[in-house]
Image (cartoon, helix red, strand yellow):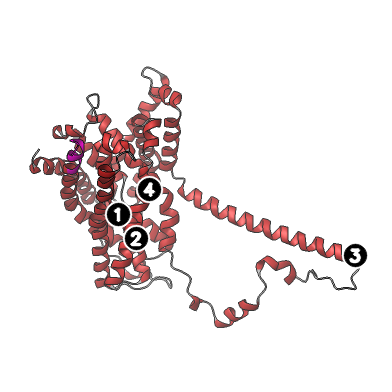
Amino acid sequence: MSVINYIAISTQALSSIFFIGATGYFLKLGSRELQALARINVSVFTPSLLFSKISRSLDRETLYDLWLIPILYLVLGAAGLEWTRLGGRFFGLTDAFRRLCSVAVYFSNVNTILIPIIEGIAASPDSRFLLRDRDDTPQKMADRAIAYGMIIGIMNNLLRWSVGVAIMTPPKSEDSCPATSRESSAYAPSPSFEGAACGIRTTVDEHTDLLAEEAARTSSSAVSRSTASGHMRLVCTRIWNAVRQCLTPPLCAVVVALLVVLVPPLQHALLQHGSYTYCVWMAIDTCGQACIPATLLALGAQLAIKRSPEPQSSQGISTTERYVSERDQNRGIVLVVLGRFVVVPLCCCIVLLSIHRFAPWLVPLLRADPMLFLTLAIVSATPPAVNLLTVAQKVKMYEGESARILSYSYAIGMFVLSVEVSVFLYLASLLSSGA
């Protein structure tokens, strides 16, 4: 195929994203409409889509062969973090604003951008070189690629509200505590010895009788057990709160779908034509088909709201938030755009092509299915996740800057992705031909 064919496939795949997103942009939906649409989408449409695609397109053996995806995700994330660290220092950005850029580069948009691109590519008659074998079909190819991308979606959901929030949360400044507090804290009793501070006598002199000594030991051990149990409850509460934040309906749907895949009899019973369980699966699949249009409409409407100037009083720079000049904001946008559309995709292609060329036995699926390479490459080049604004709102920092980064990233990304997807298709054709 010629270069024009690759460009035609990529632009046709991205055109649906542009048209649906532009429709949402010009609809100018209000906050109530967006909240209602988002609630339905997150609670029904997105979980249905993820469950139907994963449960139908994966099997247990293929799932075992995808061990590379979590490792590649962490490697590319580390490369993105290192890029923002070095680039932020080069541009002279503050540490707090550089952390925001790190989160924007680390977490990409998996569902909203990847799925319509994959479905558009599968629908093109020129993409038959991506079929795995003679029995493969464009629908199976698309479902399989979406399932590959959902593995990265799991990692995104697990780490966004833990690692992402931790990266953006500023370290507590020592200046926030008075000097007297710092001086007194050096001599204050440790919480582990709270019982001793309350006047419980734990030392025994040589004149103490055995009964008093035993009572002192009992009191000391009781205080220690009480303190230890209190710390254990605190740790368990924090762990549960972190896990509960990650247990979104889409993530729960992915987990249930993976359980179905890991139990072949259950998967066979669910997908057996003519059964009532298959009717249930068909209903779920039908709901999932509404996910992408609803998400793209909401994305376009959100970008329209974010581009609107906000009054200064609503931005309310808190004591933990530092002012970022417009010049630094522009430098941050350049840093994020280069990281998401150049650095991370380049690292991804180098890693995957190196494995395919020098160690194909590590991941046989990479050589057997060109859609695995294409999917991972596209995910590495997608814009930042829209949840960046939600994370900024959670830590109460840089909400306006997050909205500006997202707006420019998606505006630039629509054009850059057309070129990059064309390159990825060309590389995938080389891999499928055995070059």
Kind of residue indicated by mark 3: Leu
Q: How crowded is mark 3: few (under 14 residues within 10 Å), some or many (20 or more)?
A: few
Q: Name the residue under label 1.
A: 384
Q: Name the residue under label 2.
A: 81
Residues tagged 1 and 2 counted as in contact (Cβ below 8 A): no
Residues tagged 3 and 4 counted as in contact (Cβ below 8 A): no
The number of discs equals: 4
Q: Residues within 10 Å of mark 4 (few under 14, many from 20)?
A: few
> Element at badge 2?
helix
Q: Name the residue under label 4.
A: 71
| Quarter location, residue 168 | bottom left
Residue 260 screen position, x and y as percent? 44, 30
Closer mark to the observer between disc 1 and disc 3: 3
Sequence-earlier tag: 2 or 4: 4
Closer mark to the observer between disc 4 and disc 1: 4
Residue found at x 8% / y 43%: 4
Segment colored magenta: 427-435
Question: Residue 219 in magenta?
Answer: no
Residue 402 screen position, x and y as percent? 32, 61
Image disc number at residue 210: 3
Is the residue 92 above or below the residue 160 in the image? Answer: below
